[in-house]
Image (spheres, coloured by chain):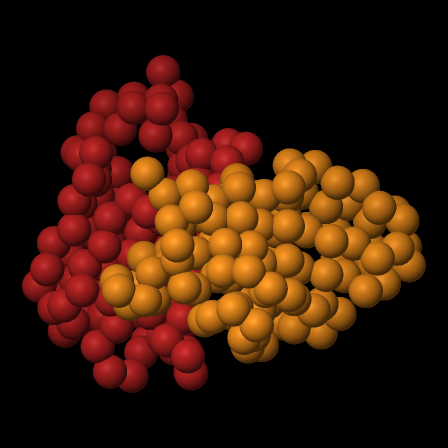
Amino acid sequence: GDSVTQMEGPVTLSEEAFLTINCTYTATGYPSLFWYVQYPGEGLQLLLKATKADDKGSNKGFEATYRKETTSFHLEKGSVQVSDSAVYFCALTGGSQGNLIFGKGTKLSVKP
Amino acid sequence: DVKVTQSSRYLVKRTGEKVFLECVQDMDHENMFWYRQDPGLGLRLIYFSYDVKMKEKGDIPEGYSVSREKKERFSLILESASTNQTSMYLCASSSTGEGTDTQYFGPGTRLTVL
């Protein structure tokens, strides 16, 4: 079945460092791809999405490109801030009902 | 802005109790979802609903039921709570107009079953 694999955390970076969180997927058809973020004590928020191959989603300095040839949707940010500390979830539309399928999440800690 | 609210942020119940978790959305969304979130397992879908009085099982429905009597409200019911249901429960909603793609989440209810 459809699935999402993302790099395990935790990831610890210094402020202004470059961030990459890897995400690869397995899916039939052409799913939409998402990154959600969960700040401490809160629910999930949509960070960005891409609906077709070669689309780039971007928001708040984060970017991810839908790569069909490598079945990947890696999240990147050029310069992280302490306020970016959160858990990041990669997801796709899939399953028998077209619902969201999530990766296990990657916890990011950014130190000043 | 879409707003999804959940009745409690923290809840402590005893084994065997009947537990109700309530979720309300204010954007007239057709679709509503219940997930549980556990460390190392990510989010797992319990139940979802595409319309009033409709419900569909997700990946882990055992031990849970749901109710959707009104479009804006989706309730998760634990008929007889057990300790392995201690978890974070997240509700979400989405519009059919956008597809089921973008889901909007509530803040979550952290349930502890003693």
Q: Which residue ends up furthest to the front in the rendered image?
A: B70
**A92 over A20 or under it: above or below:** below
* Colour orange, chain: B
Where residue A43 appears, as percent x and y from the top left, is: 49, 42
Image-based side of A15 in relation to B46, left or right: left
Q: Look at the image and tell me in which quarter the N terminus of chain B lies.
A: top left
Against B59, residue A102 (above or below) is above
For residue A8, say whether it is visible: no
Q: Nearer the viewer, residue B30 or A88?
A: B30
Q: In this rendering, is residue B88 above or below A65?
A: above
Instruction: Choose between A75 and A94: the one closer to the eye.
Output: A94
- The picture quadrant where one finds residue A53 is bottom left
Q: Is residue B41 left or right of residue A88?
A: right
Q: Residue at x 50, y 32 (%)?
A: A40
Q: Residue furthest top?
A: A112
Quarter of the image where one finds residue B97: bottom left
Q: Residue at x 41, y 64 (%)?
A: B30
Tell me: B55 left or right of A21: right
Residue shown at 26%/72% (left/top)?
A31
Residue A73 point in image, percent of width and height: 23, 59
Looking at the picture, how far across and down is residue A36, in whole percent? 36, 48
Q: Chain A appears what colour? A: red
Is residue A55 placed above or below A9 in the rendered structure?
below
Residue A68: % across, % down: 16, 72
Report the label total: 0
